[in-house]
Image (cartoon, rainbow, N blue to C red):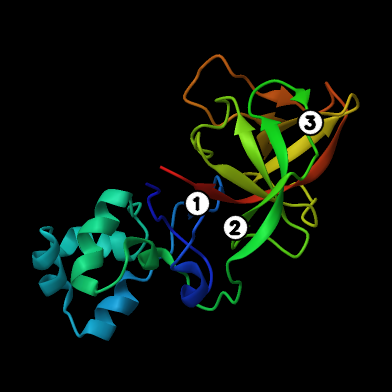
Amino acid sequence: MATILPIVGNLSSAVVCPTGYLPRYSPLAQRCSMSNRIRQLRDHQGLSRKALAEMAGTTANQLVKLENGDRRLSDHWAERLAGPLGVQPYELMLPEGVPQALRMVPMLGSVACGNWKEAVQVANRHVPTIFGGRNAFALEPDGDSMDKLLPQGGYIVVDPDQLALESGKAFVVMNGDGEATAKVYRADPPRLEPASNNPAHVAMLIGETPFTVIGRIVGVMSAV
């Protein structure tokens, strides 16, 4: 059964997802602060930080770190806090003011998360997401060069309208042979870098292989 993970969108449309896939996170390399709704929901329930900490079996200091985004709100913490706050775990990471709702986008196949690999661009099904703009599409990661950001068993959401390379952001790029890969762009020196636990994967220096930016990876849908 799929675990419901962080979501960015409309609660009423996101609570039920018959496909079993729900949003995980936006794959940004610079995530020193991760937004969540713990403080908002705690205030709504009229709970002090100390009271919520006691109910969740933690400390007020730990809760401060979680509320401020100084500590990642993992599945473990989300499950511990969701009950006392009266919500589902994924609702804790629903940022405020984001109007997007869960919708279906085309699945265009797979993308290599390793070396260049032939891109598949046949939309044989549609999958749910809340990430990206009107032209967003989904790809299934193939390989482990991005396993710190992209889980096996899920899929990434790519926004083809976001083409400008920004350091620390993840992109899908394609070489002249029609082969695609997913990497994080770093500006100094310009390179496409893996985000992997596998030391066999190395950075690709810009200029070694001509490439075209297909779009920025704006989110991950995970089934775990």
Where does the image place residue 188, in percent across and percent down from the top left? 69, 35
Q: Nearer the viewer, residue 53 or 86?
A: 86
Tell me: 10 left or right of 217.
left
106 lies above or below 196 = below
Examine the image and state in which quarter residue 176 appears.
Answer: top right
Q: Amino acid at mark 2?
A: Pro
Where does the image place residue 156, in percent across and percent down from the top left? 61, 45
Where does the image place residue 109, in percent across and percent down from the top left? 71, 38
Q: Which residue is mark 1?
A: 21
**Crowd rating for badge 1 (residues with CA inside 10 Å; few <14, some 14–19, many 20+):** many
Label drawn at residue 128: 2
Examine the image and state in which quarter residue 56 appears.
Answer: bottom left
Does dot 2 land on a helix, a strand or a loop? strand
Q: CA distance from mark 3 to mark 1?
A: 23 Å
| Nearer to us: label 3 or label 2 | 2
Tell me: 105 left or right of 174.
left
